[in-house]
Image: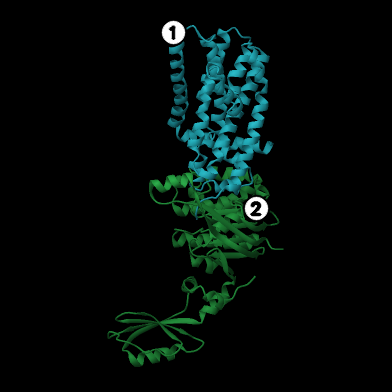
Chain colours: A green, B cyan
Amino acid sequence: MPIIDVRNLGKTYRTIEKENGVKGAVKALFRPQYREKVAVHDLNFQIEAGEIVGYIGVNGAGKSTTIKMLTGILYPTTGSVSVLGHDPQRERVANARNIGVVFGQRSQLWWDLALIESLNLVANIYEVEPSRYKQLLSHFSEVLELDEILKTPIRSMSLGQKMRAELAATFIHEPKVVYLDEPTIGLDVMVKQRIREFIKDYNQTHNTTVMLTTHDLGDIEQLCSRVIIIDAGSKVYDGPLNAIKQQFGKFRTITFETNQPIASVNLPPACEQLNLSEFSLEVRFDRSQISASQVATAVMQQLDVADFTLNEPDLESIIKHLYQNPTAYNEVGTRG
Amino acid sequence: MLRYAKLYWHFVIQRFKILMEYRLNFFIGSISTVLFQGASLVALWAVLRQVPSIQGWTFEQILLIYGLLTLSKGINHLFADNLWVVGRDYIRPGQFDRFLVRPINPLFHLLADRICHDAIGDFIVGLSLVSYAMVQLHLPVNLASIGFIILMVISGGVIFIALNLITAATSFWIMDSIAVTNVVFHTNEFAQYPLTFYHRSIGVLLTWLVPYGFASYYPASYLLGHAIGWMAWLAPLVALVCITIAYRVWVLGLRNYGSTGS
């Protein structure tokens, strides 16, 4: 049985359309014109125990709306959600015991309270058994390096400290399902790395199911084996991360630096010119049809090449390609 | 129930720790409430010292009404002050979300999140006024009368909370409900005086629509032995009906909650 079961899920917001200026505001007050905005449309997916799923899409694609429906914050307009057999809205309390949520952009802790006081209160809310709480607290203090900040109020913490504090508060009741909404936003490389390791380690030791939204593809590459891509409220890809990589991994790029200004260049078939400036040229080619040396030879016959580098595709460029070319989704195919 | 009581206690302790961090705030808050109440009383006294009574009501009798209302208001102030700012401080900045992902009732969480100590001022003023009036008016101070007053103050407090809960729930639709709450809440000022002072319609309004009269005028009338005093016994029932309706409106609002972007 899947841990998270989403069926035909949809959310439509109804907003009041306002014209500009005072006149428009007054008009909207007395004769409101409603506009319906579909944020999520007919979403279906199942997530099994222990999976870490990356949930990605551009800003406004419907990621946060989905997470809010999964956690019970928003009521869906259509369809249903079941998390460990509970309806997150109707069985809010039962569902809340099983889940942990991190919203990267806002804190769930008390602004003025020292971290340790906040954690005590959270542990009381979730009725964490005192001896277990003690155990977990010392474990988290170690792996998240909380010792230095336990007595610090949230308001005087740095962004990185805040996120470590959030994670401790989210995992202190040992949730079976965790939703992380941009957990690494704005953090430096070191903190990002520590947070990824923490999530990975927790997932492996507790078999916790994790759903992660992020714009940081490092998070995806290091944590997720499966990716769901959402675009304009609909699911456009659901499958293993490897499949995307393999499909688009057949593209590689070569960057040439030249001694003389480049006038023009004729590329062999299966090649595409990406960037051209005075002394540099970037070429993308399909490695299943042409080899790197063939491309290099063809270019070097025409230009006075000083240096060249061969680039493996990274996930970022793949996703960028997908975002820019919606039809490319079909090339990968969807699952489920 | 026991769980919630324990949890509430933990919230109170944490709140107290925060208050101790802002000690000056703590004292200013308590004192400002006393000063605020004091100013209205001076105004009342200034008017009433010119005449021995208005429509048969003496200064002390009016103080009794005023004192009872202040105590009920204090209950609301102490336990449910967050209802005033739920739109501005929780819903608009997206802070309300966290209440919805925790395994406790979101309304309980909201109220427990900030117990308002400023209410101490209300209790000091209210208790002083009621005791002073009772002694001056030679009203019996015994178990029965004290029990009656406690029952009335609790009922009145619940009525205050219920009306604020209804207006607070409008923030689920309009984001910030302070203006709506202000309009409804301030009708309680009519209930600082005998309802017979006003046009009949105000009396009906303060009894059946915004029933603040049950927090002051009716219980005071009962203590003074006036014929209309029997109405006071409806107060617990009115409170129960109000809070039930209010909670339903709140739940309806929750369903409509749209959260904020991102």
Q: For the residue marked with disc 1, what is the amino acid? A: Gln
Whether residue A112 can be seen here? no
Q: Secondary structure at mark 2?
A: loop
Residue A62: image x %, image y %?
A: 54, 60
The reply to whether callout 1 and callout 2 are in contact (CB within 8 Å) is: no
- Residue B108 horizontal/vertical position (percent): 61, 39
Q: Residues within 10 Å of mark 1 (few under 14, many from 20)?
A: few
Q: Quadrant of residue A303?
A: bottom left
Question: Can residue B99 be seen?
Answer: yes
Q: Amino acid at mark 2?
A: Pro
Give A295 or A11, whichever is nearer the viewer. Answer: A11
Residue A7 as seen in the image, left or right of residue A182:
right
Q: Which residue is mark 2?
A: A88
- Where does label 1 land, which residue? B50
Q: Looking at the image, which residue is at 57% across and 8% down?
A: B137
Please, is residue B31 above or below residue B2 in the view? above
Residue B172, picture quadrant: top right
> Residue most toward the bottom?
A301
Chain to which the residue tagged by mark 1 belongs: B
Q: Secondary structure at mark 1?
A: loop
Q: In this view, which residue lies farthest toward the right?
A: A1
